[in-house]
Image (cartoon, rainbow, N blue to C red):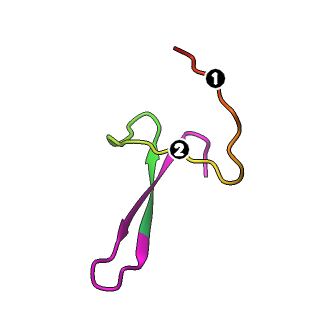
Amino acid sequence: MSRSILRRCVYWINASSEDVVCSLSCFPMDNPPEYYALSYVWGKEKPTDSII
């Protein structure tokens, strides 16, 4: 895959089985879909400083 591709992973909980399900889609960076991003970190939390 090219570096000019946006990979979007959408996940949800299947209501009937309570399994977590996901879908991975690829889009060109010059024409991406509207999306919201979620960021997370695994492992121990490191101290952070306020930037505002």
Tags 2 and 1 in contact by the CB under 8 Å rule?
A: no
On screen, residue 6 versus residue 12, left or right, reads right
Question: Toward the viewer: 44 or 28?
Answer: 44
Q: Tell me the SS state at disc 2.
A: loop
Question: Toward the viewer: 9 or 51?
Answer: 51
Q: Which mark is residue 39?
A: 2
Q: CA separation, marks 2 and 1?
A: 17 Å
Q: Amino acid at mark 1?
A: Asp
The residue that mark 1 highlights is: 49
Q: Amino acid at mark 2?
A: Ser
On screen, residue 2 versus residue 15, left or right, reads right
Residue 34 in magenta stretch: no
Residue at the bottom extreme, as displayed: 17
Q: Residue at x 45, y 42 (%)?
A: 28
Q: Residue at x 32, y 40 (%)?
A: 34
Residue 10 in magenta stretch: yes
From what the image shows, is residue 23 above or below residue 34? below
- Magenta span covers which residues? 1-21
Give the percent coordinates (x, y) of residue 22: 43, 67
N-terminal of the two: label 2 or label 1? 2
Q: Residue at x 28, y 84 (%)?
A: 16
Q: Badge 1: few (under 14), some or many (20 or more) residues near its Cα, within 10 Å?
A: few
